[in-house]
Image: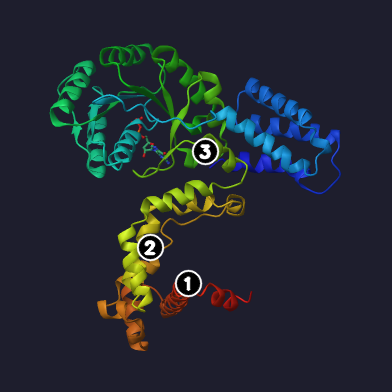
Amino acid sequence: MFDNLSEKLDKALHVLKGHGQITEINVAETIKEVRRALLDADVNFKIAKEFTNRVKEKALGENVLTTLQPGQLMVKIVKDQLTQLMGGDAEGINLSGNPSVILMSGLQGSGKTTFSGKLASFLKNKKTKKPLLVACDVYRPAAVDQLHVVGEQVGVEVYSDKGNTDPVAIAKAGIAHAKQNGNNVVIIDTAGRLAVDEQMMKEIAEIHKAITPEETLFVVDAMTGQDAVNTAKAFNDVLNFDGVILTKLDGDTRGGAAISIKSVVDKPIKFIGTGEKMDAIDVFYPARMADRILGMGDVVSLVERAQEQYDEEEARKLQKKIAKNQFGFDDFLSQIQQIKKMGSMKDLLEMIPGAGKALKGIDIDDDAFKHVEAIIHSMTPDERTTPTVLNASRKKRIAKGSGRTVQEVNQLLKQFDQMSKMMKMMQGGGGRQMMQMMGK
Ligand code: GDP
């Protein structure tokens, strides 16, 4: 995410972060470089100029040159301004209605249908919400089918009426259906076109007027940069929408749309899409995004993701097993499943401060655990609970069954053994012992 922009900003701020003498000239040069980085990221010229003017003003106001750590202060000023530019505080969606109606708008291919499914799943996981998806694209039967597929994936009902050519009527019938069935959220997926055209605008405006949704969301592909901003403006002029959904951020190296959209339409970005899978959705937090852009990671989101997957009951069981020396490969496997549920590996690693830069250009295989899983799956239940029974011939059989080598099987066993020892030590309050082991 935003690799190019991060790298350029890092370079721009590099001089100030270093220990060289800081003068008025290199502060001015830094500000110029920051502006160049923003322009390269496809940020609108006017916005980039205003941004750097504000940074300059702040830098002068806070007497950057006379402070002890001018580099740090500059980074902070840039971070604060970036946060402001992207919206300041995070803004949620309005779910006050019963049902709350959420209308999706945007061009074809922007990710509306995918996001509708992600949002339905996100809300369903909140337990108090029972969403209904409504398919209002009357031009592309495939789009209706796609919503059904998505609905099935996330376990949310989909209302559609394939023969009907009136999207307003379908939307209304969908809402009536929700009322009857106790759905307290209705997410309406609408038809998009490849480009802004009058008829599409007229149609979405009609639906909007007829159903007066609690929340109208505009979905846009972040990778389209300035075009995304222009499309947002066109939709906002007609719909006066409530919030923006930026999709495909996982493929966006430049970040121009994320940075500019708020100040052009004056509407908050509410969610982001970071992948094709149904769990690749995140609430948009401007400050956390600014941290990510500046290569500072996003530890808060990482911890939150971990907490979402944290199952207290399971954790307690696991603790007991470790204490009794019963931690086996089945437990190991379920730990892997939990990590996988937290999201894509690259996405997770990028949340660790400094890791984004270190990982640049490195292709992280999302199936990093595939081989480990294959090896464990080739073990018998006995072998999984008591790995000590694994002799040479058993290892050979497992290697063959999993399509891996005996060395790989040995390596996994060694890692497993070390991990078990370490867990046992942590359990026994042996933090000190562990430090000793690590040579501290
Ligand atoms: P719609 O025409 O607006 O409904 O768009 P779709 O939901 O059909 O999405 C278009 C394409 O973008 C599909 O191939 C999706 O899988 C893909 N897509 C949607 N959201 C994301 C995302 O956040 N990241 C990535 N990488 N792909 C996405």
Residue under pointer 1: 426
The residue mark sitting in front, 3 or 2, is: 2
Count of numbered labels shown in the rendering: 3
Q: What residue is rendered at 59% in x and 29% in y? A: 84
SS at badge 2: helix
Q: How is the image coloured?
A: rainbow
Which residue type does callout 1 highlight?
Met
Residue under pointer 3: 252
Label 3 beta carbon within 8 A of ligand 1: no
Task: Tell me how far mark 3 sits from mark 1, CA to CA.
Answer: 40 Å
Q: Earlier in the sequence, mark 1 or mark 2?
A: 2
Q: Earlier in the sequence, mark 3 or mark 1?
A: 3
Mark identifier at residue 336: 2
Label 1 beta carbon within 8 A of ligand 1: no
Relative to 371, is 136 above or below?
above
- 380 or 432, which is in the foreground? 432
Task: Tell me how far mark 3 sits from mark 2, CA to CA.
Answer: 28 Å
Which residue type does callout 2 highlight?
Ile
- 81 or 143, which is in the foreground? 81
Q: What residue is rendered at 55% in x and 29% in y? A: 86
Counting from the top left corner in percent of width and height, residue 404 is at 39, 73
Relative to 396, is 85 above or below?
above
Question: Where ligand 1 lies, by quadrant?
Answer: top left
SS at badge 3: loop
